[in-house]
Amino acid sequence: MRKKWLWAVLAVALVAGAGAYAKRDAIAMNLLKRGADAAMARNTLASLPKDQLHVAFCGTGSPLPSRDRAAACTAVIADGRVFVFDMGEGSGETLSLMGFPLDKIQGVWLTHLHSDHFEGLGPFTLQRWAGSSAEKPLAIFGPEGVTEITEGYNAVYRIDSTYRIAHHGADVVKPSGFGMAGTAITPGPVYDAGGVRITAFAVDHDPIKPAFGYRVDWKGRSVTISGDTAFTPALAQAAKGTDLYVSELLSPRMVKILEDSARSAGNANRAKIFSDIQNYHISPEQAADVAKSAGVGMLAFTHIVPSVPKPLEFALTGRAVSRFSGPIKVMHDGDVISIAGKDKFETQNLLSR
Ligand SMILES: [Zn+2]
Ligand SMILES: [Zn+2]
């Protein structure tokens, strides 16, 4: 009796399966339509509480290739506006996938002119122009030399822009909004509007000069992004009392393993580069020291060198936890930390939705 019942269930399942298989094209298109509707209507900004300062991680990687981490990019969201700090390769795409409206990007502030901090600008600027009918070029701020980069990009994309305008029309892709406009800045206040204050400070990334970190203050909340830097006492000074300290992370002991492996494999050049990079980046322990002496609420690591599989990530931070008692996090692409109040942080990932 029981066997017969099983056969009946199996037969029904087979018929249903065959029916679904026959309609698979319609089902696929239906699912696609639902996904497209949701994606087009998505506005991450609307879902983030307006009275909080948010820090979005649009690129947590480095020049070392990684499919999981785009190169350097951190965005700060205050009062419904998006301020981007660095835009390494792939990070503009990540920012878009996180659902931030392109027309809300106020500009990009570069920490320094290493290419892993600006290689995402080209494709992102094109997306923003065509995707949001921008009327003005994207504003890019950075150390002396930044205009050489923005003018170079504008030259590279000029031919493409003529095709876009010819194809879609100047009302859709407005010629005035094409490309980017670079402005060289120096340490000190670099933005002050609508209660949002951005301050640039010099860091030590020798021989890359100048190199900056940035601090963003808004309504008593703050975040400091140190960029690429060796340890210097100036870091704690700049980050004094900030809620969230965003530091790069280079694990010296892991990079030493890469250096040794490169040498064993007979690649002396690569071994030399792995050896060199250790002297102009901060170690996790030193970053924890900065966090402690600056009295920050939380330490978030980005620009992860090297990118390792998730189960091994705990080893990246070395002994940092013994030097800073607040929360320490290794960030991933898509993460957003919301600063809800003093020592009140909430983290979510916008790519895993
Ligand atoms: Zn650098
Ligand atoms: Zn870098």
Image (cartoon, rainbow, N blue to C red):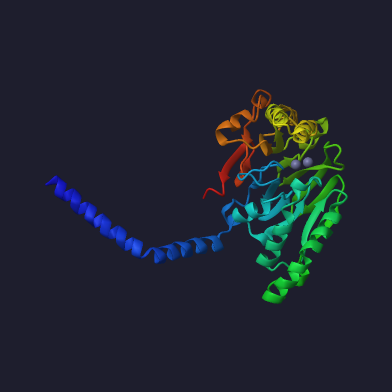
Along the line of sight, which residue is nearer the eye, 337 or 295? 337
Q: Residue furthest left?
A: 1
Along the line of sight, which residue is nearer the eye, 194 or 128? 128
Residue 321 lies in quadrant: top right
The residue drawn where x is 65% and y is 23% is 322
In this rendering, position of residue 271 left or right of residue 20: right
Residue 343 lies in quadrant: top right
Along the line of sight, which residue is nearer the eye, 97 or 295? 97
In this rendering, position of residue 153 left or right of residue 314: right
Residue 202: x, y in percent?
A: 84, 40
The residue drawn where x is 61% and y is 45% is 67
Residue 31 lies in quadrant: bottom left
The residue drawn where x is 55% and y is 63% is 40
Residue 147 vertical position relative to residue 268 in the rendered view, above or below: below
Residue 20: x, y in percent?
A: 34, 61
User: How many numbered marks are there?
Assistant: 0
Tell me if I can see residue 169 in this picture. no
Tell me if I can see residue 275 in this picture. yes
Along the line of sight, which residue is nearer the eye, 304 or 261? 261
Ligand 1 falls in quadrant: top right
In this rendering, position of residue 80 left or right of residue 142: left
Residue 214: x, y in percent?
A: 77, 43
Residue 305: x, y in percent?
A: 69, 36
